[in-house]
Amino acid sequence: MTSIQELAAAVPLVDHHCHGVLRDTPDRATFEILATESDWPEPPGMTIFDSPFGVLVRAECAPWLGLERHVTPDAYMDRRGEVGQAEVCARLLPATGIATLVIDTGFKGSTILTPDEMATASGASAFEIVRLEQVAESIAATTSASGFAADFGQELGARGASAVGFKSIIAYRFGLDFNPARPTPVEVERAAGEWLDAGARTGRVRMDHPVLLRHLLWAAVDHRKPIQFHVGYGDSDIVLHRCDPTQMTGFIKATVDTGIRIMLLHCYPFIREAGFLAQVYPHVFLDTGAAVNYTGSSSIELVRQSMEMAPFGKVLFSSDAFGLPELYFGGTFLWRRAVGRILGEWLDDDGLGRDDAERYLRMMAGDNARRVYGID
């Protein structure tokens, strides 16, 4: 009989939160920035290849480029430059076993492959997630304080018509300790005027007004589609303690009966908190996302935490990969290995039946995402 570890290594995945890969071959400096959530390069004499993710790349991705395991950083980057980004994608993306990509297109869209191009490169089907803040920023040059709500609603409806869900980065732009109440029209108009005036003064369009961020959320709620929330670990924009998902309990309670699904992304180091919310509230789901890649061989403990309290019908897989195909490969490799080992331990202890182990594996790998997003 095939072991549960072997099944975990082969089961088709739905990556329910990811981004496109770079169109062009990155140089060493660009690669190293994309291989971390930091906005700054490593200090002199250091390299991201001496991190959990860098070690993973040199161990597991290197053979796919015709190299020995555990090669030096220089050897890996030299070979990567010889092969080129397109060929690295052609080797690594299909090897992930991802059958379906659910792609957030709202970040640096001009530099990365579109969902259709990602589908071609990976052999997977692809669906779009619309980032709320990017939609608002896209209308800044043509809207007004009095027209903002209507203009945003129209643009969101047009963008969301073919999308399977939305994403909010309110954790980055404010924090998850936001006022959960829906803003009034008067509040929205006043806030839009403040935001547009600030943008005109600074020449910078960045959706960060706390009232408007709440308005975007409630406008998305009205569409009755899943809403993804960045939670916890992320780049230098965040104030980590304000990204604890329990900070948004008021909003979670207020949306229980709206028909939406709240998708908590990444969650580290608040995975247990996210698991609690997923157990208690019927419309809350979670993944371990980007944190798996960046914790490398230690990531099994993160995946284990995601399976501690949440119902197995609420746990999903995502890679949060952006720019580098290595992030897709690493995220899938580590998650498959972790889930296989955890379920294998439970089977060995006779704490779980074989049929249930296979069923829970398929649920977390893809069935839950297909159900939540309504995709085949």
Image (cartoon, helix red, strand yellow):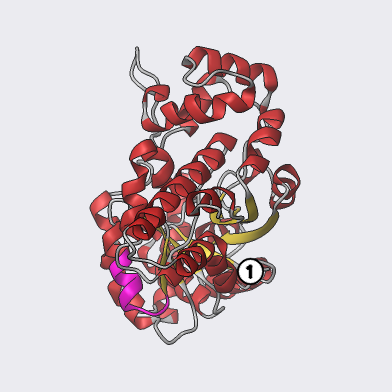
Tell me: residue 22, above or below residue 145.
above
Q: Main secondary structure of the magenta part?
A: helix
Q: Is residue 196 left or right of residue 106?
A: left
What range of the chain is rendered magenta?
275-283
Measuring 62% from the left and 51% from the top, which residue is drawn there?
Answer: 98
Image quarter of residue 194:
bottom left
Q: Count of labels shown?
A: 1
Tell me: residue 121, above or below residue 370.
above
Image quarter of residue 88:
top right
Q: Where is residue 225 in the image (x, y as percent from the top left)?
A: 55, 74
Name the quarter where the C terminus is drawn.
bottom right
Q: How crowded is mark 1: few (under 14 residues within 10 Å), some or many (20 or more)?
A: many
Name the quarter where the N terminus is drawn.
bottom right
Image quarter of residue 89:
top right
Measuring 37% from the left and 37% from the top, which residue is drawn there?
Answer: 297
Q: Which of 103 and 292 is in front in this view?
A: 292
Q: Where is residue 147 in the image (x, y as percent from the top left)?
A: 56, 72
Tell me: residue 254, above or below residue 126.
below
Q: Where is residue 285 in the image (x, y as percent from the top left)?
A: 42, 68
Instruction: Name the amino acid type tagged 1.
Output: Gly
Q: Which residue lies furthest to the left in this view?
A: 241
Q: Which residue lies furthest to the front in this view?
A: 1
Q: Position of residue 267 (x, y in %)?
A: 35, 55
Q: Is residue 124 visible?
A: yes
Q: Nearer the viewer, residue 290 or 194?
A: 290
Label 1 SS: helix
Magenta stretch encompasses residue 280: yes
On the image, numbered disc 1 is attached to which residue? 160
Q: Is residue 180 visible?
A: no
Q: Is residue 149 left or right of residue 36?
A: right
Measuring 40% from the left and 25% from the top, which residue is drawn there?
Answer: 48
Q: Nearer the viewer, residue 134 or 246?
A: 246
